[in-house]
Image: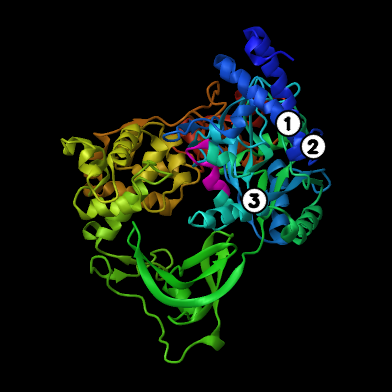
Amino acid sequence: MKDVAELSAKEAALELARLAREIAAHDRHYYQDDAPVISDADYDRLRQRNSAIEARFPDLVRGDSPSLRVGAAPAEKFGKVVHGVPMLSLDNIFSAAEVHEFCQRVRRFLGFAEDDTLSFTAEPKIDGLSASLRYENGLLVQGATRGDGSEGEDITANLRTIRDIPLQLQGDVPKLFEVRGEVYMTHQSFEALNRRQEEAGRDAFANPRNAAAGSVRQLDPKITAARSLHFFAYAWGAASELPAQSQWQMLELFRNWGFVVNPLIRRCDSPEALIAFYEDIAHQRASLPYDIDGVVYKVDRLDLQERLGFVSRSPRWAVAHKFPAEQAETVLEDIAIFVGRTGVLTPVAQLKPVTVGGVVVRNATLHNEDYIAEKDIRVGDTVVVQRAGDVIPQIVRVVPEHRPRHTHVYHMPELCPACGSHAVRETDERTGKKEAARRCTGGLICPAQAVERLKHFVGREAFDIEGLGEKAIEAFFADGMLKEPADIFALKARFSEGPQAIATREGWGAKSAANLFAAIERRRKIALERLINALGIRHVGETTARLLARSFHTAPAFFAAMQEADAARSLEGISGIGPIVGEAICDFFAEPHNLAALHRLLAEIEVLPAAEPRAAVQSAVYGKTVVFTGTLEKMTRAEAKARAQSLGAKVAGSVSKKTDLVVVGPGAGSKRAEAEKLGVAIVDEEGWLRLIGDSEK
């Protein structure tokens, strides 16, 4: 073997390619198979030679170089990555009955009979951090966190250090393919990490998930490399092609490409088989070397997944069957009142700290005064606490035998603790009953509502302004620097000294202040759906904001329609927006103070049009309002609506002058008559399928 100093550039390139393949194979033998075939000393010599060649020929460092496993230079901050295919979350179920309902719901959507074969995959739900890996020509070029599902953080350098993640895929792979999965930490690695933390005088991590998430988001990849992280592959995002016809076959390909796939995954053909798998995994849970919080079921056939599509932010073809929440007893020491951005007074239990499911819980939601009265919860009680869905702490019940003497029935305050205004329970005009929530009537004069609206505005699902957290919002508001959203974007112009005005504040420095101003500037361009969500309109969250953005497409069109006399009529035609939500939206835009604040905000930012739905570019129905009526024979009504929406159409429940097309089946009645009266185009199911290019159905 030639000395490194004697190698030519061509020889060095060939040897680096050989070393990359050889070291990657030894990594698989050692880390995945637990069966090394060479000694540690021989392995170290291979890596040392690779490093020596790279040091002499730095321009020849490969994308799959073993040296990338130990980390690159520290980053100043993480860049943003927009997911070409959103990383959506899963709906949760908690019982065997809900498993049967999920299977039946899938069958109904697809129009499957009871004896039609419907297979699923079932896999443990790893409690870690979701990540997406982008491969081009088989080479890892980018890795990102899930983020908010639409946009994540670029953590490529950190993910390269995880040995379960191949830097170069093996075999014949698509030109472009995004592999998705879960980064996690084993119990053994977690305990070792916490021992090191304690020895260094640093805080221990609460659980393996937090440790994994914190490790993979280190600015210095060398820290990530030292944390012993792992990765299970189980899904995919953007792809130039899908080289399989089922979920099961895709997992087999993942294994062939060099990924670790959970060996416990099974294929099941009935709800009973899914439930049996769940019970078996629940029994094994305590003995597994990693944390899981449930089981995930997915329809196996990919063509059926495509037909089922998505609803809101989750697929119709998959669901998470979560384990029962872990519980613990503790003492309720006090009840605090939190005033939200819509004025709702929410009681929060302040607890004697207790560990539930590996997390220290100090507070738990009490929802509203009816919830407190129903359970007769009092200050001083011993209570049973659980983390609902293993996430949100809540009080399940009181332990009456441990109740101290002289406790008092709890009464909600009738005055807002933030502004002193009356706090009332409004009457629902439709039912005549009192609403569960008690609301502050202070409106514009209530500082708590203003602060919470600002927190919501800069939150991850809204403008997502890094560095402008809850404490900063509270401090800036208290000092009169921020009163409304437009003030955020006017901060730089307001202070002639720029970031220095922030840098001198307690807890800030020159770098953090500069980063804040840069983050604000990056968000001067915002997607319409994020802006709508950020406005804090009652009942309007991510899903409704997305519906509105896709229905009106541009900010001028949406805001103009909402200020018209028949704004409510415009909203009635949008499938998924009911009268209560519609009324809340109209009320928001009928308030002059809201419009004035919105106009000031729009003067500071640029609102981007709603993103075109996938497959909508060539669609003949893009932007059209479609109504379905009667019985469809070649697809279910739900599938037809989902297909129309995926092509960029708006699906309405009633016919109006704004309807473009009515699709009729046998049994069509008043909607067809209304369409004929208004001169709206009418097609039967065959005509609809030809129009959207699905005539082969």
Foreground mark, 2 or 3, reads 2
- What residue does disc 3 label? 189
Residue at position x 71%, y 44% in the image? 298
Find the magenta span and give its range: 212-221
Give residue 670's quadrant in the image: top right
Q: Is residue 13 above or below residue 186?
A: above
Amino acid at the residue labelled 1: Tyr
Residues at marks 1 and 2 touching, judged by CB atoms closer than 8 Å: yes
Amino acid at the residue labelled 2: Pro
| First reached walking from the N terminus: tag 2 or tag 3 | 2
165 sits to left or right of 273 = left
479 sits to left or right of 115 = left
Q: Residues within 10 Å of mark 3 (few under 14, many from 20)?
A: some
Res 305 seen here: yes
**SS type, badge 3:** helix
Q: CA distance from mark 3 to mark 1?
A: 22 Å
